[in-house]
Amino acid sequence: MSGLKLTEIWIYPVKSLGGIRLKSAKVFEKGLEFDRRWMLVDRDNDFMTQRIYPKMALFKLSMSQDQLSINYKSDSIPLVPANSSNLTLTKAVVWDDEVEVAEVSDEHNRWISERLGVSCRLVSFPENNSRPVDLKYQLNHEHVSLADAYPFLIIGEQSLADLNSRLKEQLPMNRFRPNFVFSGGNAYEEDTWKHFAIGKNKFAAVKPCARCVLTTVNQDTGEKGVEPLLTLSKYRKQDNKVLFGQNLIAIDHYEIHEGDEIILN
């Protein structure tokens, strides 16, 4: 027994909006089912995130029997997965990648724009559309959803506990938007992982996660501060990047469950 256990599973259906905690999830090549399959784009078709629009944190997602909804205060609007057979595709930009996406609806665009206070459009990323993982980190020509660069992110509870021991105010894990949280082991031990299994799903750890100002946005208030980047930069900086968490690629594509044991190879 490794003593390592999966304690939380998270998806973020719309890039940079609120996450949903699940008891189980299907593992796909591009990421967990529904994870970052939508995003907001501006008038130039560039992706939008809390880095520039921290108020996006106030849009929360929920799921009931596979029905997704976007919620803002007391209002909500349903979010339906795209049927790729009858979509009109357009181009959008995520970092250095140009991807083909489909606009969801004028109703969604109006609803979100009015509440965010910024003109934007909601687009979906059909499952079969192309977005290769960085060639240096591919194992088998993997693709990724609209996440920044990699299909999955894992962080240990002990890593957050160590960070919080250095902070004046404790921060929750949602500042770091992981897909997987685990218990057991030492702080930052995920840095050293290469190949491991969560339940019957094998994964490969490919690259530590470089963190940005999004981690400084309070996910309850949408307000931006200086932590945790200020503290992390004092002891987690490497090649001018602040590292926290580990990016993963999936080898197997089964279902994953809260409570699954993690076995290191």
Image: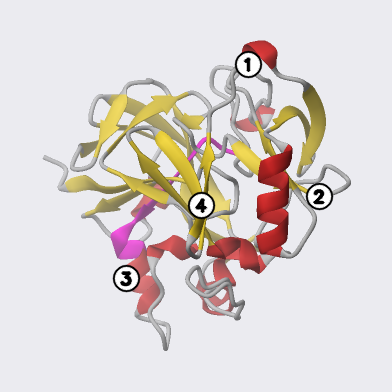
**Is residue 265 visible in the rendered structure shown here?**
no
Residue 161: image tag: 3
Residue topped by disc 2: 42
Amino acid on which disc 2 is placed: Asp
Q: Is residue 55 above or below residue 168?
A: above
Under circle 2, the secondary element is loop
Mark 3 against mark 4, which lies toward the viewer?
4
Query: Looking at the image, is mark 3 or mark 1 earlier in the sequence?
Result: 1
Under circle 1, the secondary element is helix
Q: Is residue 38 above or below residue 169?
A: above
CB of mark 3 within 8 Å of CB of mark 2?
no
Residue 235: x %, y % from top left: 51, 73
Under circle 4, the secondary element is strand
The residue segment tinted magenta is: 149-159
Residue 102 appears left or right of 65: right
Residue topped by disc 4: 76
Distance from disc 3 to disc 1, alpha carbons, whole Å, reads 43 Å
Residue topped by disc 1: 84
CB of mark 4 within 8 Å of CB of mark 2?
no
The front one of 246 and 92 is: 92
The residue sitting at 29% across, 31% down in the picture is: 256
Amino acid on which disc 4 is placed: Ser
